[in-house]
């Protein structure tokens, strides 16, 4: 009996890193999300969002991205047979732009940061278009939560989970999955780079703040403000 369409993402290996384990003096396990066809975890949530929107009648996907989300939307659109428009900021590396185009999507470069690119993408939406957000959508979090489902299925209950934060979509999905499996007491370490630390600054301020600019070299993590749900999780 089918539970819906086959996901566009694949199950990825969970492997121990001997190098990191030796360095840290503890067992360090890596969820190998770089093995997803578009190269990142983004396909988990993006794939579910694209499949859902297509089933609801969308005839084109429009997205804004610093890189990885755009590649995932372009990949999903190609598999689903729908055209894709991705707007990226000027900080997006040429290679990421090439990878988006390689999937058959149209790439537009606009603005100094993701916020400016996102504003342009929103202005492009037509009546039969679906906007695929790179990090702020419950469908994305639902898809990203499958990463934790796979860890649980492997029989692993971690002592702590470490992940990177840009806009907070991965964080929301991982926490959603952890709470679903009863791991509410397992700490999550959310790591950001200096110059793109919108979550850390929000926690310090006690409210969501907007960074004046992204100065980190990690431009794919360059969200000047984290999504409201990510900040809300820090209060729980």
Image: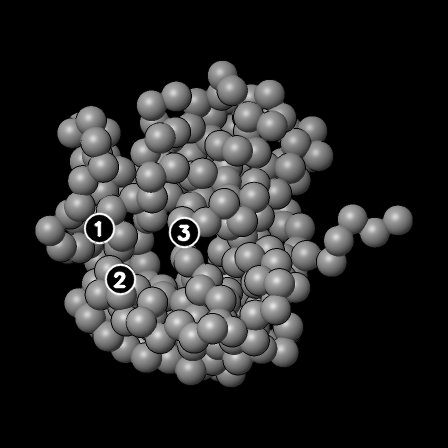
Residue 99 visible in the picture: no
Mark 3, secondary structure of its residue = loop
How far across and how far down the image is residue 9, in percent? 63, 57
The residue positioned 28% from the left and 77% from the top of the image is: 109
81 or 30, which lies in front? 81
Query: Please, which residue is most extreme toward the front here?
Result: 127
Q: Position of residue 27 (x, y in %)?
A: 52, 28
Mark 3 is surrounded, within 10 Å at the Cα level, by few (under 14), some (14 to 19) or many (20 or more) other residues, namely many
Q: Residue at x 66, y 50 (%)?
A: 11
Q: Few, some or many C-alpha atoms within 10 Å of disc 2 (few <14, some 14-19, many ≥20)? A: many
User: Residue 224, which numbered label?
Assistant: 1
Residue 129 sits above or below residue 207 on the image: below
- Disc 2 secondary structure class: helix
How far apart are the two marked residues, 1 and 3, measured between alpha carbons? 13 Å
- Asked if marks 2 and 1 touch (Cβ < 8 Å), the reply is yes
Could you tell me which quadrant the C terminus lies in?
A: top left
The numbered dot on residue 135 is 3
| Residue identifier under label 2 | 114
Q: Residue 58's x, y, as percent?
A: 56, 70
Give the alpha-carbon distance from disc 2 to disc 1, as whole Å.
8 Å
> Which is nearer the eye, 150 or 2?
2
Rendered position, 222 above or below 235: below
Residue shown at 30% from the left, 64% from the top: 118
Whether residues under marks 3 and 2 lie with C-beta atoms below 8 angstroms apart, the answer is no
At horizontal 63% and vertical 50% (from top left) the residue drawn is: 12
Q: CA distance from mark 3 to mark 2?
A: 12 Å
Horizontal and vertical percent position of residue 81? 63, 78
């Amino acid at each position: 009996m089918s539970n819906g369409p086959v996901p566009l993402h694949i199950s990825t290996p969970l492997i121990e890193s001997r190098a990191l384990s030796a360095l840290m003096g503890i067992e360090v396990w890596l969820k190998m999300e770089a093995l997803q066809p578009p190269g990142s975890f983004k396909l988990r949530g993006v794939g579910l969002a694209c499949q859902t929107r297509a089933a609801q009648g969308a005839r084109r996907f429009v997205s804004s991205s610093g890189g990885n989300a755009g590649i995932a939307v372009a990949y999903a659109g190609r598999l689903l047979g729908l055209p894709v428009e991705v707007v990226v900021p000027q900080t997006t590396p040429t290679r990421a732009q090439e990878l988006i185009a390689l999937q058959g999507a149209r790439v537009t470069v606009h603005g100094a940061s993701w916020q400016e690119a996102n504003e342009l993408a929103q202005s492009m939406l037509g009546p039969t278009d679906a906007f695929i957000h790179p990090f702020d959508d419950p469908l994305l979090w639902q898809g990203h939560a499958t990463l934790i489902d796979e860890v649980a299925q492997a029989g692993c209950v971690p002592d702590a989970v470490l992940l990177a934060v840009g806009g907070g979509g991965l964080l929301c999905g991982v926490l959603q999955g952890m709470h679903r499996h009863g791991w509410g007491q397992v700490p999550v370490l959310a790591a950001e780079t200096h110059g793109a630390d919108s979550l850390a600054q929000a926690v310090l301020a006690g409210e969501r703040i907007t960074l004046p600019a992204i100065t980190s070299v990690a431009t794919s993590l360059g969200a000047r403000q984290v999504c409201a749900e990510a900040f809300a999780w820090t209060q729980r």
